[in-house]
Amino acid sequence: MTTAPKKAAKGRSAPRSARRRSREFALQGLYEWLLSGDPDARNAGAIEAHIREITGFDKADFAHFDQILHGAIRESAELRARFLPHLDRKLEELSPVEHGVLLIGSFELIHLVDVPYRVVINESVELAKSFGGTDGYRYVNGVLDKVAAEVRAAEVAAHQR
């Protein structure tokens, strides 16, 4: 999964912030981790080293990438416990991209409270649009909306007023 995100209209790429790039690279690392079947995250350091060699990584927010990649791997069981009740299928039936995006989105909703929940969900939707299947972004949006309502209830309620 080292492909570039899909192009915007008229062949131009949409401008991407350093944070968005860090999420894209973290998703690539999580994709590799999920496919490796390494539940103990023994290869997290090797995955990180591999991702850091990809062209364009120098434009990413390194600290954000590191926090998301290692945090999502380290806390994957707890993150899954948050989003599993909102799935309409078994975890094994999720694509690795959807699974990775849900790990990133859940991690950010729970641990990066300085990032508004709507930004977390929007960024997750954009990841799913760029790297996932045709309608995967809708699924990600629905699941993360429910997670946000649980873990950031006050922020969601304030926004709905």
Image: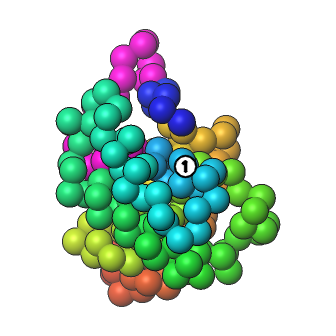
Amino acid type of the residue that numbered disc 1 sits on in the rendered structure: Tyr
Residue 72, x across and y down, in percent: 44, 67
Between 158 and 100, the residue placed more toward the observer is 100
Image point (59%, 49%), residue name = 97
46, above or below 141, in the image: above
Q: Circle 1 sits on which residue? A: 31
In the image, is residue 22 part of the stretch drawn in magenta? yes
Q: Position of residue 86 (x, y in %)?
A: 66, 75
Q: In the rendered image of this protein, does residue 128 appear above or below residue 66?
A: above
Local crowd at mark 1 within 10 Å, few (<14), some, or many (≥20)? many
Q: Nearer the viewer, residue 130 or 154?
A: 130
Q: How many marks?
A: 1
Q: Which residues are magenta?
A: 7-26
Q: Residue at x 24, y 42 (%)?
A: 60
Q: Residue at x 39, y 41 (%)?
A: 50
User: Quick check: 36 left or right of 55?
Assistant: right
Visible residue check, residue 145: no
Q: Please name whichever residue, 10 or 86, is drawn nearer the observer in this view of the structure.
A: 86
Q: Position of residue 52 (x, y in %)?
A: 30, 41
Colour scheme of the rendered structure: rainbow
Q: Is residue 93 left or right of residue 146?
A: right
Above or below, comparing residue 63 to residue 157 in the picture: above
Q: Quadrant of the rendered structure where residue 158 is?
A: bottom left
Examine the rendering and report whether any part of residue 91 can be seen.
yes
